[in-house]
Amino acid sequence: MKKSKILVALDYSSEQAAMQLVEKLKPELCRLKVGKELFTRCGPSMVKNIVAADFDVFLDLKFHYIPNTVAKACEAAAELGVWMLNVHSLGGEAMMQAARKTLAYENAPLLIAVTLLTSSGEKELKALGIEQTPAQFVRRLATMAKNAGLDGVVCSAQEAPLLKQQCGDDFLLVTPGIRPENTASDDQNRVMTPQQAITNGSDYLVIGRPVTQAEDPVRILSEINTQIGLVS
């Protein structure tokens, strides 16, 4: 069965609110992303409940610490049955290699790395003393992730064409900051519509409030899936 390229971000403060949306959705319409707030409030049991509802879950915790600890965290996350999880590329190549090694088995979750948050741009990089454009910095971090054997990265859809050229078509690009036309950009700086993102080379699109705050989220998802097509 083909599955959607859409990852709905469950940015809720309670399990009850998140599950109310989950119960309305269908696994063929989207996959689901559990981030820091929901996981911290509700814990592993919340993830298990979503997995039990037959949804592919992207556990978005951006692990970033010493290699051994990150590897153990990835191992624990995989035991929850998630489809994909991530680390932060700023933890370095050795950390990413340790994470890759612990997930080097058949049917392990996909392992990707965060590059530069879509809420950050050139201004934020300069404040950190990094004299590179966002595209240059993302390219550097993506190269590290590929060298470490990861399956892909989280990046802006604006960087997708460059990264597909650099890292190859099999290197997955997960892109937040996706906003359907005529919707607010909220706290994201580098945003793009779903159709633009797919054209640029994005493999998976992270969409939050345009779906979670919609009066009819199923209709919104169906419309976006029709626009961009479904992929396995």
Image: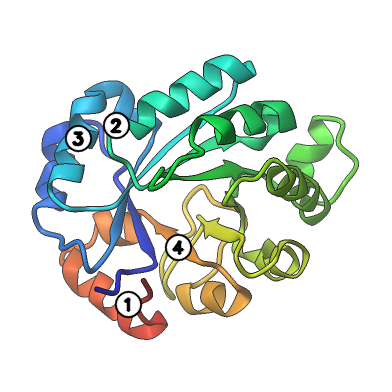
Tag on residue 79?
none
**Residue identified by numbered label 2:** 38
User: Which badge, 3 or 2, comes first in the chain's sequence?
Assistant: 2
Query: CB under 8 Å between callouts 4 and 3?
Result: no
Considering the numbered disc 3 on the image, is that residue within a helix, a strand or a loop?
A: helix
Considering the numbered disc 4 on the image, is that residue within a helix, a strand or a loop?
A: strand
Give the amino acid at mark 3: Lys
Q: CA distance from mark 4 to mark 1?
A: 11 Å
**Residue identified by numbered label 1:** 225
Compared across the picture, whether 148 is left or right of 228 comes to right
Q: CA distance from mark 4 to mark 3?
A: 23 Å
Compared across the picture, whether 138 is left or right of 219 comes to right
Q: CA distance from mark 2 to mark 1?
A: 25 Å
**Residue identified by numbered label 4:** 205
**Residue 144, x across and y down, in percent:** 75, 42
Query: CB under 8 Å between callouts 3 and 2?
Result: no
Question: Quarter of the image containing the C terminus?
Answer: bottom left
